[in-house]
Amino acid sequence: MSDDLYPQATPEMSRERRDLAPETHAAFSAFSKAVFADGSLDAKTKQLIAVAVAHTTQCPYCIRGHSKGALKAGASKEQLMEAIWVAAEMRAGGAFAHSALALDAVHDM
C-alpha cells in the first residue's frame, strides 16, 4: 500500500503472525477457507459480500484482498462498485436509523 499509515503486508509479516500463534493461525486459515468455499452461495457472491463488509469495517487490507478475490472469482468491476454502494447505503442507513436514539434522548429532557 502506498499509505504510510498501514504497513505493506509481506510474507515475512505473515510468517511472524503464524510463528507467534501457530495453532490459532492454522484454525483461522481453515475457518477462512471453509467460509469462502462454494456452498449455498458461490465464491463470487461471498467475495462481493466481503468487499461490502470490508468497506463497512474500513479494513484497507480486506478491501484490497477481497476486491481482487471478487474479480478473480468472476465479479465485474460494476458488480464490485455496486457492492460498495450497498455498503455505503447500509452505513449511512445505520446513522439515519440511530437518529431515533438522539430524538428519544432529547424527548426525555
Image: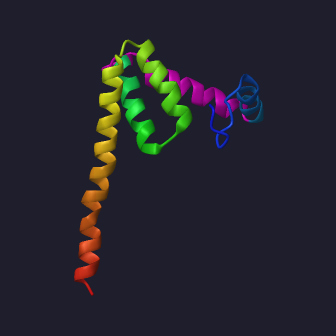
The range drawn in magenta is 21-43
| Residue 74 drawn at (x, y percent) | 37, 12
- Determine whether 88 is above or below 80 in the image: below
| Residue 71 drawn at (x, y percent) | 42, 16
- Determine whether 63 is above or below 39 in the image: below
Q: Quadrant of residue 46?
A: top left
Is the image coloured rainbow, by chain, by secondary structure, or in one colour? Answer: rainbow
**Depth check: 77 or 97 in front?**
77
Quadrant position of the N terminus in the picture: top right
| Residue 23 drawn at (x, y percent) | 69, 31
Q: Quadrant of residue 12?
A: top right
Left or right: 28, with 49 as reference point: right
Residue at 37 percent of width and 26 percent of height: 48
| Residue 103 drawn at (x, y percent) | 24, 73
Q: Quadrant of residue 20?
A: top right
Q: Main secondary structure of the magenta part?
A: helix
Q: Does the magenta segment cover residue 94?
A: no
